[in-house]
Amino acid sequence: MKKILLYLFSIIFLFSTQLNAIEKKKLTDTEWNEKINTLKWYNEDGKNTSIKIPGSNANLKIYENEIYLLGQDIDQYDWWAYGRSEGMDAIRVFGGNYSYTITKPENNGYVKIDDWSDVSPEELIQGLRDANTDKGDGLSYAKQINWIYKPSLDKEKNLVTYSYKVIWNNDSTSMESKNIILGREGHIDQTFVFGDLSNTRENADLAKSASLDTSFTEGYTYKDYKSGDKIAAAGIGALVATSLGVKALKSSGGAAAAGGILLLLKKFWWILLAPLAFLGKLFGGGDNEQSTNTSKPKRRVKNKND
């Protein structure tokens, strides 16, 4: 009897493992149309709602024009769309012209803001430029990187926002808009990518306004801090630098500086490739705009006044 139970358990375990396995390949257009609907998409009925951010004591407002993925489905989406995934994301939200990701929260403690005066937007942007010049290896590199909005600390709302624009060596444009939302036990990272880059300032404004869509529950807001609570090892200045991947570049060089560059390159693939999915396959059924749309329905662009 024990042998039978053990056998059945092994079969069930093997079956569940195969079901949950990530298919590590980039899909062709035909395959995309066939498989994208197999992911578990949320809010397809199009409602304004609020959901808990996994691993946190915070909630996120979802608009009627948005659908979203959670957990492993995000990793599968990234493999199918880009041929890679970092496995760092808790929520991926898709609107008509934008996508944003909330990374898996790391509740490392209350982030002090005493070191904000150490933040130098000029040094940060120069670090990005230096790390993304032509290395002669045939990879894409940035010709220009400029702030759209420099890092700004809102002490009333307890958040940091910034946006920057990248012009690549093939003259394509990408941008990143980031919200770092502070709470009592840690912070939430919200990163936007846009499909239409004809008005980067308007995109940045939309992303900045979206910081208000994330709220910590009562007792866990930044203002709920009490003496004796865990303090994060890094203050807000160091956190902003780390979010850009340039903190290590301020060191004397060697392994630390190389680590900073590697972190940047790991981060930049998302900024470079994600807009391509909007222009081609995202909800649209392949790279050909005239192709049959058998994928997820398109949604309207979120109104900034929502």
Image (cartoon, helix red, strand yellow):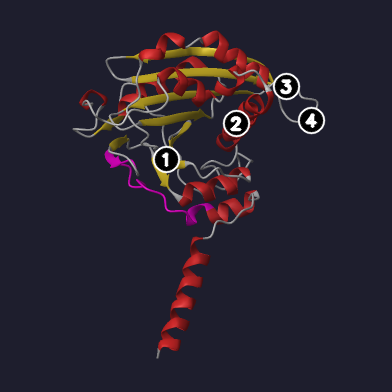
The CA span between labels 2 and 3 is 20 Å
Is residue 124 visible to us here? yes
The numbered mark, 2 or 3, whose residue comes first in the sequence reads 3
Q: Position of residue 132 (x, y in %)?
A: 67, 22
The CA span between labels 4 and 3 is 11 Å
State the quadrant of the N terminus. Answer: bottom left
Callout 2: few (<14), some (14-19), or many (20+) C-alpha neighbours within 10 Å? Answer: some
Residue found at the very far left of the displayed protein: 218
Give left or right: position of 250 versus 92: right
Main SS of residues in magenta: loop
Q: Which residue is mark 1?
A: 104
Give the camera-side residue of 305 and 181.
181
Q: Which residue is mark 3?
A: 169
Give left or right: position of 12 versus 228: right
Task: Describe the element under mark 3 as helix, strand or loop.
Answer: loop
Q: Residue at x 58, y 42 (%)?
A: 281
Kind of residue at disc 2? Leu
Q: Position of residue 22 (x, y in %)?
A: 55, 56
Res 222 → quadrant = top left
Span colored in magenta: 36-53
User: Of discs 1 and 4, which sits in the foreground?
Assistant: 1
Vertical relation: 144 (above or below) 254: above
Kind of residue at disc 1? Lys
Q: Residue at x 74, y 30 (%)?
A: 139
Vertical relation: 12 (above or below) 244: below
User: Of discs 2 and 3, which sits in the foreground?
Assistant: 2
Task: Describe the element under mark 1 as helix, strand or loop.
Answer: loop
